[in-house]
Image: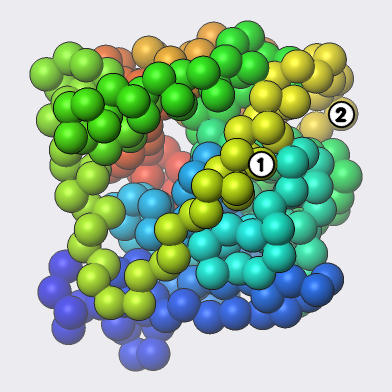
């Protein structure tokens, strides 16, 4: 997309050019970006482990923003948001609600990827009136199979990446097949498209706190999800190593109003590998 197409009137349609703004609430100054049309129910994106504003795939954000108002943000202690990163998913959910309410929003759709999907599951139970529809990608329920192993896997794949001079996401998010490797390189290339006003990398302390939160989520007792009546779209790759794909099927089975999409020859980052198909499905789901 050329720069002349990035702005329609005064509406930003390209994540690459979305201004980084801030709002203060609950003693935290949250950094966020928004783009897309001003009307309709906004879609709030909840990020993954070690994810800052610049870690969202611009093809996914722009795809949503063609039809919807999209808001991405750094939760407490992440990127340029102030405060210290909580060690539980529940606290992260409280902070996310504080941020959403600080923008004066009364109802939102939520797209939670990986750790963000765990946070979304808490929000929809603590503040059900705030959530209209949910998209849960690359994620799993509390106590889900293999979630407690995320710490070990993250350390292992970070070491593999260092030894091979690659980005850990190439191992964590994508399969080692030819298709997976190619998709990983393309995804990592897209993350560099924004050159100005980039976010601050996450601190090792924040990363460690997030790992602790995910580990605790993996050790929790399974929760009753039958009270979540909102429509939910669940999506993942068929070979997710971080949050094993069977967790997506488990979520879809236990949520009363869910539909499941699984992408072939794809890992944790299946929605980025199949970004075009995912955006089409997700936007149709939200507009239905």
Which quadrant: the N terminus?
Answer: bottom left
Toward which corner of the image does residue 40 lie, by quadrant?
bottom right
Dot 1 falls on a residue whose secondary structure is helix
Residue 287 in view here: no
Residue 284, compared with residue 191, is above or below; it is above
> How far across and how far down the image is residue 102, in percent?
76, 74
| Structural distance between the alpha carbons of marks 2 and 1 | 29 Å
Seen at 71% across and 65% down, the residue is: 83
Mark 2–mark 1 contact, CB under 8 Å? no
Seen at 28% across and 22% down, the residue is: 160
- Can you tell which mark lies on residue 169? none
Q: Nearer the viewer, mark 2 or mark 1?
A: 1
Seen at 49% across and 72% down, the residue is: 34
> How far across and how far down the image is residue 177, in percent?
17, 14
- Can you tell which mark lies on residue 227? 2
Q: Which residue is mark 1?
A: 209
Which of the pair 96/236 is nearer the observer? 96
Which of the pair 185/133 is nearer the observer? 185
Which of the pair 26/285 is nearer the observer? 26
> How far across and how far down the image is residue 213, in percent?
70, 34
Toward which corner of the image does residue 159 lie, by quadrant?
top left
> How far across and how far down the image is residue 109, in percent?
64, 53
Seen at 46% across and 26% down, the residue is: 154
Characterize the local packing of mark 1: few (<14), some (14-19) or many (20 or more) Cα atoms within 10 angstroms.
some
Dot 2 falls on a residue whose secondary structure is loop
């Amino acid at each position: 997309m050329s720069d002349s197409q990035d702005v329609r009137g005064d509406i930003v349609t390209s994540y690459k050019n979305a201004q980084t703004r801030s709002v203060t609430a609950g003693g935290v100054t949250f950094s966020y970006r928004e783009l897309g049309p001003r009307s309709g129910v906004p879609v709030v994106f909840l990020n993954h482990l070690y994810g800052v504003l610049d870690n969202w795939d611009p093809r996914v954000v722009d795809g949503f923003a063609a039809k919807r108002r999209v808001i991405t943000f750094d939760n407490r202690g992440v990127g340029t948001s102030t405060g210290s990163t909580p060690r539980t998913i529940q606290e992260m959910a409280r902070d996310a609600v504080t941020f959403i309410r600080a923008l004066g929003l009364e109802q939102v759709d939520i797209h939670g990827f990986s750790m963000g999907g765990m946070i979304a599951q808490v929000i929809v139970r603590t503040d059900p009136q705030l959530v209209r529809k949910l998209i849960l990608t690359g994620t799993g329920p509390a106590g889900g199979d293999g979630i407690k192993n995320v710490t070990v896997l993250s350390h292992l794949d970070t070491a593999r990446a260092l030894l091979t001079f690659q980005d850990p996401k190439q191992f964590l998010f994508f399969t080692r097949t030819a298709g997976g490797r190619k998709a990983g390189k393309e995804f990592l290339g897209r993350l560099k498209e924004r050159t100005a006003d980039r976010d601050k990398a996450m601190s090792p302390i924040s990363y460690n706190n997030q790992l602790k939160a995910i580990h605790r989520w993996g050790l929790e007792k399974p929760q009753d999800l039958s009270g979540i009546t909102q429509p939910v779209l669940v999506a993942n790759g068929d070979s997710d190593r971080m949050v094993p794909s069977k967790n997506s099927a488990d979520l879809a089975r236990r949520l009363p109003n869910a539909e499941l999409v699984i992408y072939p020859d794809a890992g944790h980052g299946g929605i980025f590998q199949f970004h075009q198909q995912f955006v089409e499905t997700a936007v149709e789901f939200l507009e239905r």
